């Protein structure tokens, strides 16, 4: 993720990569996608990543749930 990139743009780009991988026959789970996205976020999301990892079972946390959480967080950051 780039420092100036919005979470929506980043997740759209990540989703496109995942879809391309799946179209080539790669079997990739939501757990793997979520873990990779959480590792590649910018430092401004560090405390959100920690909260998500503490509050949720990563094996059951979907990409859509992650997307909603990160977008809600970015919206709150942009309001203040």
Image (spheres, helix red, strand yellow):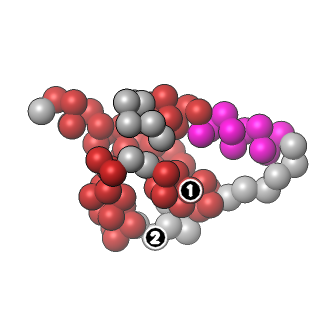
| Image height of 37 relative to 35, above or below | above
How many callouts does the rendering have? 2
Query: Which residue matches tag 2?
Result: 57
Crowdedness of circle 1 by 10 Å Cα count: few (<14), some, many (20+)? few
Residue 79 lies in what quarter of the image?
top left
Crowdedness of circle 2 by 10 Å Cα count: few (<14), some, many (20+)? few
Q: Earlier in the sequence, mark 1 or mark 2?
A: 1
The x and y percentages for residue 61 are: 50, 60
Question: Is residue 76 located in the magenta-colored stretch of the structure?
Answer: no
Instruction: Write the residue at 45% across / 36% down.
Output: 2
The x and y percentages for residue 64 are: 51, 45
The x and y percentages for residue 35 are: 54, 60
Query: Which residue matches tag 1?
Result: 36
Q: Secondary structure at mark 1?
A: helix
Residue furthest left in the image? 80
Which span is picked out in magenta?
14-23
| Image height of 79 relative to 53, above or below | above
Image quadrant for the C terminus?
Answer: top left
Please indicate whether residue 22 sits to the left or right of residue 8 in the image. right
Residue 55 lies in what quarter of the image?
bottom left
Instruction: Write the residue at 78% across / 44% down.
Output: 21
The x and y percentages for residue 53 are: 39, 67
């Amino acid at each position: 993720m780039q420092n100036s990139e919005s979470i929506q743009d980043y997740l759209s780009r990540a989703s496109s990569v995942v879809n391309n991988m799946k179209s080539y026959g790669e079997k990739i789970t939501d757990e793997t996608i979520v873990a990779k996205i959480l590792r590649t976020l910018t430092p401004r999301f560090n405390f959100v990543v920690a909260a998500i990892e503490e509050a949720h079972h990563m094996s059951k946390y979907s990409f859509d749930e992650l997307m909603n959480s990160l977008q809600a967080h970015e919206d709150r950051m942009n309001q203040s």
